[in-house]
Amino acid sequence: MDEIRLRQEKVEKFEGFVDRRLKPDLVNAIAQRSDLKRNIENLEQNGVTSFQSMVNLGSEVYMQADVPDTRRIFVDIGLGFHVEFTWSEALEFISVREARLARYVKASESYFRYQLNDANTL
């Protein structure tokens, strides 16, 4: 009986972690990718090859940035690494990454349901 209760507590703790930490992180990552995708599409549609912008350096300190050539951009691919892409390469990367995230979410949900059902059957 104690083993069942301990397993159930572990499952509940893990579900809480997923709800409090992982789901918001996933939503944030998807939103950032969607923003990047929309910005790239806007650059392409409007034929923008250069622009000026304000960049947040941190702690709400901004600096003017001049982007002389927008045809190539750096994309954060994770773990602190950035890769230089053309617009079409970046859009392809975003599509692949979104599909992978969707598969990961689906697999994780299946795994958690299995774990929960397994804990309830003991």
Image: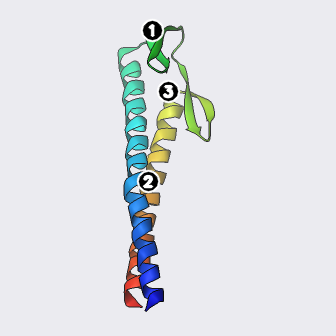
| Residue 69 x/y as whole percent | 54, 12
The kind of residue on which mark 1 rests is Phe
Using the image, tell me which numbered label, if any, was put on residue 22: 2
The kind of residue on which mark 2 rests is Leu
- Front residue of 59/110: it is 59
Q: How many residues crowd around disc 1 within 10 Å: few (fewer than 14), some, or many (20 or more)?
A: few
Q: Secondary structure at mark 3?
A: helix
Q: Can residue 114 be seen in the rendering of this structure?
A: no
| Residue 24 x/y as whole percent | 38, 48
Q: Can residue 82 be seen in the rendering of this structure?
A: yes
Q: CA distance from mark 2 to mark 3?
A: 29 Å
Residue 120 placement, left or right of 111 = left
Give the residue drawn at x 40%, y 41%. 28
Q: CA distance from mark 3 to mark 1?
A: 15 Å
Q: CA distance from mark 2 to mark 1?
A: 35 Å
Using the image, tell me which numbered label, if any, was put on residue 87: 3
Residues at discs 2 and 3 in contact (Cβ within 8 Å):
no
Q: Secondary structure at mark 1?
A: strand
Give the residue drawn at x 46%, y 80%. 7
Give the residue drawn at x 38%, y 89%. 121
Q: Compared with residue 30, is residue 107 higher up or lower down, i.e. above or below?
A: below
Residue 86 placement, left or right of 9 = right
For the C terminus, the image quarter is: bottom left
Classify residue 109 by image quadrant.
Answer: bottom left
For the N terminus, the image quarter is: bottom left
- Front residue of 39/111: it is 111
The residue that mark 1 highlights is 51
